[in-house]
Image (spheres, coloured by chain):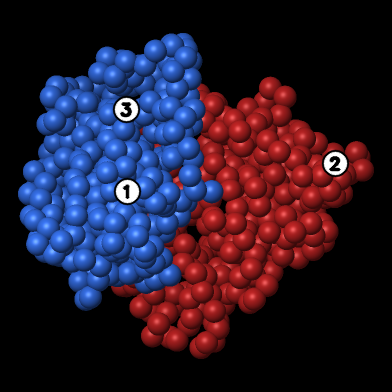
Chain colours: A blue, B red
Amino acid sequence: MKKILNAPEAYTDDMLKGIYGAHADQVKCTGDDLRCYCRAQKTDRKVAIITGGGTGHLPLFLGYVGDGLLDGCAVGSVFQSPSSEQIYKVSREVEAGAGILYLYGNYTGDIMNFDMAAEMCEMDDIETRSIVGADDVNSSADQERRRGVAGIFFMYKCAGAKAAEMGTLDEVLEAAQKAKDNTRTVGFALTPCIIPEVGHSNFTLGENEMAMGMGIHGEPGIWNGPVKTADELAKESLDTLLADMPVAEGEEICVLINGLGATSIEELYILSGSVRSCLDEKKIKVYRTFVGEYATSMEMAGASVSICKVDEEMKKWIDRPVKTPFYVQA
Amino acid sequence: MKKILNAPEAYTDDMLKGIYGAHADQVKCTGDDLRCYCRAQKTDRKVAIITGGGTGHLPLFLGYVGDGLLDGCAVGSVFQSPSSEQIYKVSREVEAGAGILYLYGNYTGDIMNFDMAAEMCEMDDIETRSIVGADDVNSSADQERRRGVAGIFFMYKCAGAKAAEMGTLDEVLEAAQKAKDNTRTVGFALTPCIIPEVGHSNFTLGENEMAMGMGIHGEPGIWNGPVKTADELAKESLDTLLADMPVAEGEEICVLINGLGATSIEELYILSGSVRSCLDEKKIKVYRTFVGEYATSMEMAGASVSICKVDEEMKKWIDRPVKTPFYVQA
């Protein structure tokens, strides 16, 4: 394992100390728990949006806490859920009188702990709603069972915009739901990654082998096989995405080409070009393309392709300027 | 070699097609040469700033072309200089009546071709000035012979701001020079990277071996040895930086923690925290910290630490909002 760190067991907390040290003007922790990550400023009467999940996916999850996006994040250890207590503490800190939306990925441990935190909030008369990202098409035929991956970005963006416009809790939930309904993702890995405290990867991929549909924690995909070309990967990804969520000629989408960690930005743009060619052929109009690292698996090589079907309302939400230490849109 | 691409020989052009496709509102190429990369908008009477260099370092170099930063970039093949003809074509396209600053890295091929382009511009009565980034302390004891690496970001930022404020050509050059004089970088690699058309790395690093001072094209560093901890790397880097450019107690610096490509954002923040602790001990005040990928070597693992000593004028330049497809500051 080659990583820049001090001790594997200090990975998450050392990372958090680094983040708070670098961005004290924008974020802070609640009390003395580093894992309770909050926006430094609070907007009175705004619906608070809270996310959470394991470490190892930066900028997901905490990187989206900031102006125009999220208000807090409960941070778990690498690939582990945060505790319900931590989610509750973040909730108490960022709640601003208009209720809380819990918006996170569809993973069992997270659901259990967010639900428990919601009950704790209820006892304090703080209203909550919950919605999970579940955009990873290849993870299950059943939409309810799909894992949440990079496509949650569009949910953050739409819900964050609606909350910044001082929408009600139900309106913010609706915005997140609308983004969820219109977003799908396909991802593939070229190499595994290593959990620092484990010290070796949980699986291997051969010299020229890749895994289509692999999850961001290394969950098995739908096939392993020789590495395909960017054009082939774009075509296969889009075929899967569009079979699951048809987009008619002339309809508009946003595209998100996400790097899983070790894949170079150059390759992401090669893939982006291939995806664009396929979409042009199908006469599907691209409103906006995002390319970069939005949801990673530490040093895993690979990428994901997300599409989000947009109407005028969603375009406005997606274009709204936001600013976090990790993500700025002007 | 595991990369997402179509054909190794199409790497640079496929990447460029992807970039133009995704960001047609912000950038364009001149004529039909993809390698002549220009800002889509032109500001009359503004000094034009042009950079250039080989592919494989995104967001360096072309990623800094955009509002408030650079106006054009001549793009070479992977780790190769662009031609003087391409630099000249970019120059003709972006020149806006106030002259051109060539601002690029201190590499022999680039210098030769930029100098040749400057002569071609001179024949057209277009005034040019040139300055090279040469911030990599470990690459030579002689400042004039040092390679340019991630610290060029501060030169772009200061010169870009001065140009956006409609400074004269000499004032923009001075701003770049001021940033150069106050910036130093130390970098280290944990793994090599592979040039697509070569197909294998030009050197190897052992299971637990790293290279201190390695260049962004894999130029040999000052020592190879076992991977050190984040705290040790921070201390050694700062000792080297501060020995070369002393910073007194109470003086202010900006810090740039740059990932070389495959290193996770988590690790960069662990390193950032270690650097911050060292600086706090030395009572050196940090004005602003930048963490992320600013100058990469494709899928090389590793990082660099840059410091830039700042006064009030430079802080204003560095804080000035900018917007490119790759880098936004609001």
Residue occupied by mark 2? B121
- A38 relative position to B171: left or right: left
Q: Quadrant of the C terminus of chain B?
A: bottom right
Q: Are marks 1 and 2 on the same chain?
A: no
Chain of the residue under label 3:
A
Q: Please name whichever residue, A211 or B81, is drawn nearer the observer in this view of the structure.
A: A211
Q: Nearer the viewer, mark 3 or mark 1?
A: 1
- B326 relative position to B211: left or right: right
Residue occupied by mark 1? A168
Q: Looking at numbered disc 2 in the image, what kind of residue is underneath it? A: Cys
Q: Looking at numbered disc 1 in the image, what kind of residue is underneath it? A: Thr
Is residue B146 at all visible to an observer of this figure?
no
| Residue B181 % position (x, y) | 65, 70
| Residue A64 % position (x, y) | 35, 52
Is residue B319 at all visible to an observer of this figure?
yes
Q: Quadrant of the N terminus of chain B?
A: top left
Q: Name the residue located 39 percent from the left edge and 51 percent from the top edge.
A: A166
Q: Nearer the viewer, mark 2 or mark 3?
A: 3
Chain of the residue under label 1:
A
